[in-house]
Image (cartoon, rainbow, N blue to C red):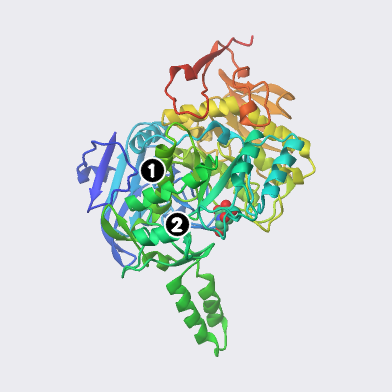
Amino acid sequence: MTDKFIFGRPLDTEAVILGGLEPADAALLEKFFHMSEKEIEGGEGLLFTCKMEREDIVYGLGENVRGINKRGWIYESKCSDDPFHREDTRSLYGAHNFLIVAGGRKSFGVFVDHPGKIVFDVGYTKLEELVISIPDKNVCLYIIEAGSPEEIVKEFRELVGSSYIPPKWAFGYGQSRWSYMTEDEVREVAARHRENGIPLDSIYLDIDYMERYKDFTVNEERFPDLQGLVEEMKAQGIHLVPIIDAGVKIEEGYEVYEEGVEKGYFCRTQDGRNFVAGVWPGRVHFPDMLKEDARRWFGGKYKFLLDKGIDGFWNDMNEPAIFYSEERLQEVFEEIEEYKNKNLDIQSFFAFKDIVAGLNNNENDYTRFYHEYHGEKIRHDRVHNLYGFNMTKAAGEAFEELCPDKRILMYSRSSYIGMHRYGGIWMGDNLSWWSHLLLNIRMLPSLNMCGFLYTGADIGGFGADTTEDLMLRWLEFGIFTPLMRNHSAMGTRRQEIYRFENTEAFRNIIGLRYGFLPYIYSEFMKASLSDGMYCKPLSFVYPQDEQAKRVEDQLMIGESVMIAPVYEQNADGRYVYLPESMKMVRFRSLRDREEIVLEKGHHYIDVALEEVVLFIRRNHILPVAEEGGQCVEEVDFKNLTLLSFADEETQYIYYDDDGYGKDYKNTGNYTVLKVSPEK
Ligand code: MIG
């Protein structure tokens, strides 16, 4: 059961699409939260306080640092570009305001549908108190009571609509790097994968394909024939996926800029000038993605690339990230001037240093521009978390119009719940740190709860230099994430896998992904079509098992498989908890594998650097392709080997389709696979 509580006059974020919900009596809320009005950040605000029991677990909050259980930290919903995030970071790229308090006494879900800043203090100030504070009095809150956490998730997802489905090829391996400068460099990436027999389905084009970082342009010198390149790559089974940035470069003669100015499609300052910010191209304007006609216009621009045969995109910098605002930059020059004749001592030195260091993503800049949302003029900070959502919606709606029968790959950096209907997300800029591999593992189920099923992190790490062993371990986990992309930043150690020595191990591990694809795709589609989760915490599947509830580094992937990734350097294995007897399968490659049945309980499992280990649940089936292939097109989704752990007649409902169209509901997409008992 879902109850809706309305305070003041909240903005419609368009996150919730289920109609017909009447507001509940505010008194009902008392069962879950004590509400109070309070001054927050110098303005009127609302505070929702809830006492937690010692054994309660708090799930959710999507893209955030720390554990699957979010207790013990304070998180802020405020989409932020933070490429150096650490354990004490409070906000990342997305704002996902859904959480579940699962506990002894009661379990319930809460979705705070509010597009501005929200603080979730989950036992940070007081160990056993959950406090949600919102510096605004116009808020919409949903409380969901539905039994188990899994049922709460399902009911929540029915509220916000079904998750985006990418084309099948987007489940293949993708190679990306910021700094593929020319057509030849792209050709080389493709060739080196093919030469080495490493499967590959996509190569990403980062900002360097554009002309001076201008959206919807191609650098003619370095990419003289993009359309030709797209065709050439497609003939090898490889899709090119260009990036699109939020800011539109200010440049005379640049069509997108001129049109936007002429039609009034950009965000404006208080006094009506087009707001100027500095990002990649230097000075830019931000399209007002929240304004319907501007959004339609921006979406329509993707046609430029669709017409060249492109069928996938990634939307970047749409928090929106701001290096500096024109106004702030001027202020900084003046402030620095004052330090010229000062003796820089301990106080003034750091103050001086922070002036420039604090230029980018400065909170104050988000109060300097306005949107026109549903006909109302609204200051950006009040709707900050909707920008990335609406940029991706712009694209999603355009694709619906331009190619209604075809799936287009789309994922975004910034997001808000509701955007999951239009695209996936990648987990933003991470680092080549072992702790970020672990973070990737823990974020996956949290994002799934919030509807973001098509997701994954930059495998190997974006910033900092990776190592061969980190690459191997990260891929061994990455083969289970729906989005599987190796991406790295310009200037860091190159991490295309043919750069490392152990090509065979890499080939085998990525080969496993292609072998597992029938299962991964089937489970992803079933989850998406039923508002379920592709990846779950163990506790969702074994709710009675007290030990399973506390497991933070193992995951359920689909209905049949549990994984326990190795995420520590120099480890030769790890402890694994089995909530029931399972069959462990150790793979060195698709064909080279061994199986052993293990009892419920704790085990130390050896996992060599070149191995993938997974666990099949009792009376479950893992269908794998007999042939992997070099790209998704080559994978045989029909002739399957059924790996299983069956002591009775066992079934698996297998979903498959053509991977391009949208005839998801066709009953012909489902087949029942059967296995007889092993003894
Ligand atoms: O500020 O386009 O998250 O994936 O490679 C950097 C360059 C801008 C940030 C993205 C990253 C991408 C990079 N972009």
Instruction: Please state the horizontal and vertical placement of residue 237, each as a whole percent of the image.
Output: 64, 34
Residue 212 lies left or right of residue 451; in this view the side is right
Residue found 68% across the figure and 41% down from its top: 473
Q: Quadrant of ligand 1?
A: bottom right
User: In the current view of this chain or complex, which residue is farthest to the bottom?
Assistant: 341
Residue 128: x percent and y percent?
A: 40, 50
Residue drawn at x 69%, y 41% as measured from the top left: 190
Q: Nearer the viewer, residue 673 or 406?
A: 406
- State whether residue 130 appears in this view: no
Q: Quadrant of the N terminus?
A: top left
Q: Earlier in the sequence, mark 2 or mark 1?
A: 2
Q: Is residue 448 above or below residue 296?
A: above
Reading the image, the residue beneath label 2 is 256
| Residue drawn at (42%, 23%) of the image | 665
Q: Position of residue 329 (x, y in %)?
A: 48, 74
Above or below 141: residue 371: below
For badge 2, the amino acid type reads Val
Please tell me which residue is depicted at 48% across the width and 20% down the height of the picture. 669
Residue where numbered disc 1 is placed: 418
